[in-house]
Amino acid sequence: MFKNLKAELDSIMERDPAARSRLEVYFLYSGFKAVRDHRIANWFFRHNMKLIARWISQHSRHKTGIEIHPGATIGKGLFIDHGMGVVIGETTEIGDNCTLYQGVTLGGTGKDHGKRHPTLGNNVLVGSGAKVLGPFRVGDNARIAAGAVVLTEVPDNATAVGVPAKIVRVNGEKVTDTASNELDQINYTDPVAEQLTDLDNRLNDLKSAMEVFENGAGI
């Protein structure tokens, strides 16, 4: 148990440049606390003591702002950075050494039964505010950009960007022209902004047409 705890602490120390010591992570990192509480809740859940499991998970939610259903399956070295607003559904499966940022949802669409939530492979990174919804797989070493809404499978070593998310890189090679070369959670196309710009352009065209009409009619 102590060996596993040390490994979890070390995995966070390796990935978070702001972490100064294991003690800091142990006592002050909400993501670490949430995962630690989940491992206890999951034990009760698997041993059919579901009321106790839910009580532990809800208590942890109030302490950390991170909601993990006790039925979720989580591998080694999960790092939830900052963590506020993270939601992980009951049938979610998360592989080893994954990273989730604040506001991430690993949820369902309300259309499925049984397995309703995503499966993340190993070494997956999910950017802040991203939503991964449905019972599909996100492959090993995949990257999901901040704010993306992922509704379909993501291959191994791929980068998904946008709303709805599209695969823009696989194995380091571009597959579209819409993404930046690296997933830095900043330099990618914002589809909402694009639509607003398009509407603004159309409005300007309409104003120009009205001015021509008014001038021609002598109004």
Image (cartoon, grey):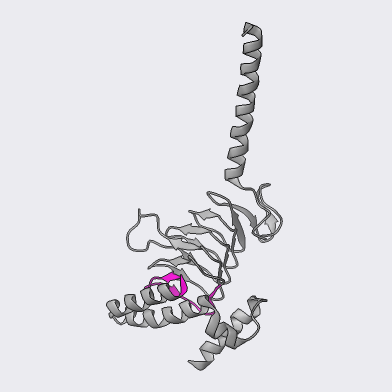
For image coordinates 36% across by 79% down, the residue present is 56
Q: Is residue 70 magenta?
A: yes
Q: Is residue 52 magenta?
A: no
Residue 109 visible in the current orientation: yes
Position of 124 relative to 177 (above/below): below
Please provide percent x and percent y for residue 148.
55, 55
Quadrant of residue 217 within the rendered picture: top right
For image coordinates 56% across by 75% down, the residue present is 97
Please identify the residue farthest to the front as the structure is shown: 219
Q: Nearer the viewer, residue 63 or 156?
A: 63
Tell how many labels. 0
Residue 8 visible in the current orientation: no
Quadrant of residue 112 within the rendered picture: bottom left
Position of 199 relative to 10 (above/below): above
Position of 111 relative to 51 (above/below): above
Quadrant of residue 155 within the rendered picture: bottom right
Q: Residues in magenta? A: 64-80
